[in-house]
Image (spheres, rainbow, N blue to C red):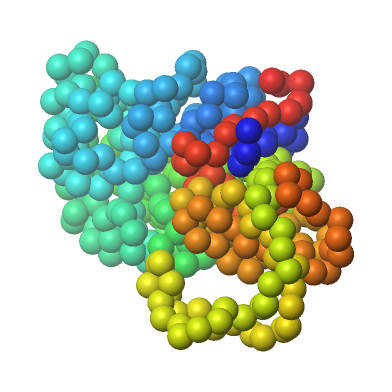
Amino acid sequence: MYPRIVTDLEKLKHNVERVVTLCHGAGASCAIVTKCVCADALVAAVIEKSGADYIADSRLQNLASLKTRKPRYLLRVAQPCEAAQVVAHSEVSQQSEISTVRLLGAQAKRQARRHKIVLMLDMGDLREGVFCRDRAEILALAKAVACEDMLELHGVGVNLTCFGGILPDADNLGCLVEIAEWLRAETKLPIPLVSGGNSSTLPMLLAGKLPSGVNGLRIGEGYLLGNETASGTRMEGFHPDCFTLEAQLVEVKRKPSKPIGRSGPNAFGEYVSFEDRGEMLRGILAVGRQDVVPDGLAPRGAGVDILGASSDHLIVDLTRAGEQYRVGDVLSFTPDYGALLRAFTSAYVEKAYTGDEC
């Protein structure tokens, strides 16, 4: 059935192993992130067989579903209401609030389960973390973790690029390392992990410019799409086509290129302008914004151009393709990160697989 997202597990295995090799070669641990694929069981099985040090996700439901012997690493700072589930379904979590740390400490004691905390620092991207200049709060949070019998201060970490678009560099990652060293001196704790961010840090690693002391990365887009997160640049030695979105044509007709009549906002409140290019051969595919991010799809077929989408339909211009496409034909697209995330999240997109790992 269509639409469907097809995963090439052999290519994905290659990308996972390449990321792990690169991280380990630089003296860094590797947390492979499954959130984009909703901790898909077959993708997780590939990661389980790899040398990855952690399997990471931002959603507790995903971590709870994993069958793994690897430490489960929770990326999103915990909601107070889910403290019990955090301890039950992850071995490591990223935290930034003293009150939440105390809840986790109480739950860890209640469940008799040791839990590791990575203290998140905000180095300027302005998402989660104690602001890097607030040394008093950083130290107070570290001491709050140390005071809990069943918690361990496992490390410090940073998130960059995702919200403010701030790129990792020698300054912000160097400051992260300096704070880790300062915390070790202040607390007399080993604090083994300095987690230097996500796939946007891979260019520094590949260039041999990862600051000494950064010894962990959390990688998602890098192995999924073979891209560096910030610029979308393809990285050498990675497969960029591990995933294919397939959708079926339900209508192929010649129509004008510009809508006719008085115009207003579309179903999403957008005012869209259309260029009059005369008559064109238009196709409609049975997939829409509820399933994918249309702007994140790259057609693989020659002569196919995306015009736009509504909730349930993707409209394409087939004029350049001539008369080769008919109703019932399946078109293929390469998704970017956002399109892949929505396709895996949608219950209306079937999941299919190729490769020996099936």
- Percent across and percent down for residue 150 are 22, 22
The answer, for residue 333, to whether it is visible in the render is: yes
Q: Considering the image in quadrants, where does the C terminus appear?
A: top right
Between 328 and 116, the residue placed more toward the observer is: 328
* Image quarter hosting the N terminus: top right
At 41% from the left edge and 30% from the top edge, which residue is drawn? 62
Measured as percent of width and height from the top left, residue 350 is found at 57, 34
Apparent side of residue 31 relative to residue 158 in the rendered image (left or right): right
Residue occupying the point 43% across, 72% down: 266
| Residue 153 drawn at (x, y percent) | 30, 34
Q: Is residue 107 left or right of residue 208?
A: left
With 109 as the anchor, is 75 left or right in this view?
A: right
- Looking at the picture, tell me which residue is in the foreground, 318 or 40: 318
In this image, 277 relative to 92: left or right? right
Q: Position of residue 332 (x, y in %)?
A: 73, 48
In this view of the protein, which residue sits in the foreground, 131 or 348?
348
Q: Residue at x 55, y 81 (%)?
A: 260
Q: Is residue 16 visible?
A: no
Residue drawn at (45%, 83%), measured in percent from left and top?
A: 263
In terms of depth relative to the viewer, which is nearer, 83 or 26? 83
